[in-house]
Image (tube, rainbow, N blue to C red):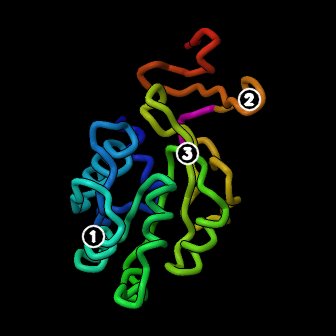
Amino acid sequence: MRDNALSGKDLFGASADNPDTYLCVLPLFHSFGQTVIQNGAFAFGGTVVMLPRFEAAPALGLMLKEKVTFFAGVPTMYWGLLGALDASVDVKAIAANLRVAVAGGAALPVEVHHQFEERFGVTILEGYGLSETSPVASFSRFGEPVRVGSIGTPIPGVEMKPDRPGEPGTRSPTPTASARSPSRATTS
């Protein structure tokens, strides 16, 4: 998990010299929220703004009030944010602060990706992971062209190759050493 947290430098341009302000709407008992938000923020001296339960309007309000620079969520959260935009939301001010947006947990619909980029001026970076990879295995890189719908490339220290169509096999220095599809044996 330490390596995943520190990979924020390569993946998202994280820096202790200019730490991000993260809006935490993901549960911290889940590996996505714990690694990308909590550990990622703490690894670089960032600030974590907590919202106990995701609701789009309060999330947008906190993004504005706290000058959030980093948002991570599942696709339905992005859909919710877009649906909550109305004349009362200062999208321009939120967009001026927002530097990184990441999605995981499920495939992000192309329409949501394009609408978010159009409204906020930020490209959503998608990734892939599972608990056995602590949890990030691959991600699109900040500042590089994104292929919408792609899980990106393996993060430092992780090797990936197709196990079966649609099922990436991974090998990494994480606690389980590697992960394969559930029907196959795990190798180290």
Question: What distance separates the C-alpha of mark 3 from that of mark 2?
Answer: 19 Å
Nearest-to-viewer mark from 1 and 2: 1
Q: Which residue is mark 1?
A: 58
Q: Which residue is mark 3?
A: 106
Q: Which mark is residue 148?
A: none
Name above or below for residue 48 compared with residue 184. Answer: below
The residue located at (27%, 70%) in the rendering is 58
* 142 in the magenta segment: no
Is the magenta region chiefly helix, strand or loop? loop
The answer to whether 21 appears left or right of 94 in the picture is left
Name above or below for residue 96 compared with residue 106. Answer: below
Q: Residues within 10 Å of mark 2 (few under 14, many from 20)?
A: few
The residue located at (74%, 29%) in the rendering is 162
Q: Position of residue 88 (x, y in %)?
A: 34, 89
The stretch in magenta equals 155-159
Q: Position of residue 134 (x, y in %)?
A: 42, 32
Nearest-to-viewer mark from 1 and 3: 1
Q: Is residue 19 visible?
A: no
The amino acid beneath tag 1 is Pro
- Whichever of labels 1 and 2 marks the residue nearer the N terminus, that label is 1
Q: Position of residue 108 (x, y in %)?
A: 59, 55
Q: Quadrant of the N terminus?
A: top left
The amino acid beneath tag 2 is Pro
Q: Residues within 10 Å of mark 3 (few under 14, many from 20)?
A: few
Q: Residues within 10 Å of mark 1 (few under 14, many from 20)?
A: some
Which type of secondary structure does the marked residue at label 3 adopt? loop
Front position in the image: 3 or 47 = 47
Which type of secondary structure does the marked residue at label 1 adopt? helix
